[in-house]
Amino acid sequence: MADHASLNLKLSQEMKDEFTRTAEALGMPAATALKVLVTRFILEGGFPFDVRIPNPKLNWEDPRIVRTKYKEGKLIVPSSWRDEDDDE
């Protein structure tokens, strides 16, 4: 039989309840959901999702933000992005 080790963490009761409800909605107990996270963390060499602080200063409605488009399956970028040697 394999050796087992415990991993303890403290959460607010609200977080624990929400985590448990979400795991159960996925058809598994909370402990299994944690094992899935740990397994993926090991396989990926870190979190299997982005872990960032959202930038509240970035306003996506700002007209100065340059947007790209797709046309007929090709990425269209602003001409200002072209390098001098693009035509070669």
Image (tube, rainbow, N blue to C red):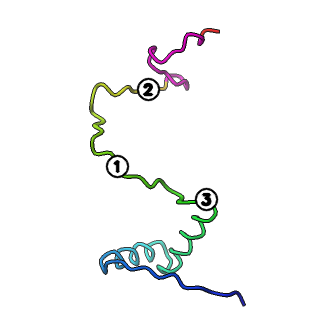
- Location of mark 3 (residue): 44
Q: Locate residue 57, reporting x and y percent.
A: 27, 41
Is there a contact, CB below 8 Å, between mark 3 and mark 2?
no
Query: What residue appears at the point 60 percent right and 11 percent down from the top-left corner?
Result: 85
The amino acid beneath tag 1 is Pro
Residue that mark 2 sits on: 68
Chain part drawn in magenta: 71-86
Relative to residue 48, is residue 88 depicted above or below? above
Asked if marks 2 and 1 touch (Cβ < 8 Å), the reply is no
Image coordinates of residue 58 in percent, x first then y, are 30, 39
Q: Is 78 part of what is drawn in magenta?
A: yes
Task: Answer few, some or many: residues within 10 Å of disc 2's Cα (few below 14, many 20 plus, some between 14 and 19).
Answer: few
Q: Tell me the residue at 45%/74% (across/down).
A: 23
Q: Whole-Å distance between the Cαs marked 2 and 1?
A: 22 Å
| Residue 24 sits above or below residue 53 on the image | below
Q: Quadrant of the C terminus?
A: top right
Q: Amino acid at mark 2?
A: Thr
Taking depth in this image into account, of 3 and 19 the one nearest to the observer is 3
Q: Report helix, strand or loop for mark 2.
A: loop
Magenta residue check for 80: yes
> CA gap, disc 3 to disc 1?
22 Å
Q: Say what secondary structure mark 3 lies in.
A: helix
Q: Earlier in the sequence, mark 3 or mark 1?
A: 3
Mark 3 or mark 2, earlier in chain:
3
Residue reaching furthest right?
Answer: 1
